[in-house]
Image (cartoon, rainbow, N blue to C red):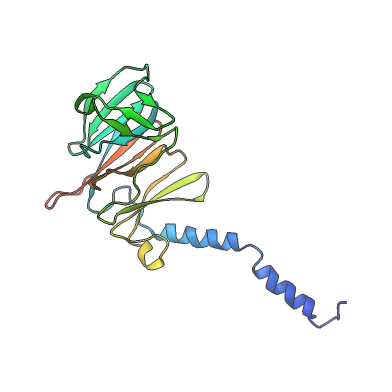
Amino acid sequence: MRIFGRSTPFDNAMKIFSKNINPEHENRLRLRKLVENAKKSDVPTGWKKETFAVGGLSEVGFSKNHPELLLIVSSQGRGIIDCSKFELTERDNNTDFDWFNSYELWSMGIGKLTNEKIPVSGLCGGGLPLLSEYGDGIQYMATEWPIIDLIFEPEFKSIYKEEDSKHCFRIFHDYELRAFGFSSNGEYFITATSSEINVYRKEKNGEEHHV
């Protein structure tokens, strides 16, 4: 029963309940704030980037025998990018796709990688390493879905820690993402959509920052 001019125990209970009625919303706002704290730069400090246009890109994969070599699978066949030089070094227009296994997620290489079965990530699934031996990481976030954010976390920093978030970089902010991750040696990483691929190379001492 309501007593005019007074709060009943029921009223007080409802106030407490209403404050906590949507903890998911509060958590989402907290995460958005952390993402906003990150530096808005698609090239983290200490890295260089080159963008390659690839129509119909479906999968990518780094060679384990030659970590600087990146295999690209597209509707037009296969290609290899030498990430150490930012150069497309091999191209094969064979579209029979008998060299690709969409269930086991591997592709046979071409050129220097002809005899290597390369694990791939992309349209059919799979995933590249998200943490390097240097402590660099890439975090997938979608606090503004359907927009996707990729956060680069340098040297064991975490976007989820407020004191670390300002040292992180928002390197991707878009609607469509096909693949992302590091090479096995941590010297390179990529972000890819269906139409282009961004290749990142760790800078050597004395190199200049370049976009």
In the image, residue 11 sits, relative to residue 156, either above or below, namely below
- The quadrant the C terminus occupies is top left
Q: Which quadrant, please, contains the N terminus?
A: bottom right
Q: Seen in the image, is 188 located left or right of residue 165? A: left
Residue 109 percent coordinates (x, y): 27, 27
Q: Looking at the image, how many numbered discs can be counted on the residues?
A: 0
Viewer-nearest residue: 26 or 103: 103
Q: Which residue: 30% across, 17% down? A: 93
Quadrant in the rendering for residue 183:
top left
Name above or below for residue 121 compared with residue 205. above
- Residue pictured at 21% horizontal, 45% vertical: 210
Relative image position of residue 163 (x, y in whole percent): 37, 68
Residue 52 appearing in the image: yes
Q: Residue furthest bottom?
A: 6
Relative placement, left or right, of 169 versus 14 is left
Residue displayed at 24% across by 26% down: 115
Q: In the image, residue 96 lies at what x, y percent?
A: 37, 16
Residue 143, horizontal then vertical, whole percent: 50, 52
Q: Residue at x 51, y 50 (%)?
A: 144
Identity of the residue furthest to the right in this view:
1
The answer to whether residue 42 is above or below residue 158 is: above
Above or below, comparing residue 150 to residue 175 in the picture: below
The furthest residue to the left? 206
Q: Is residue 54 visible?
A: no
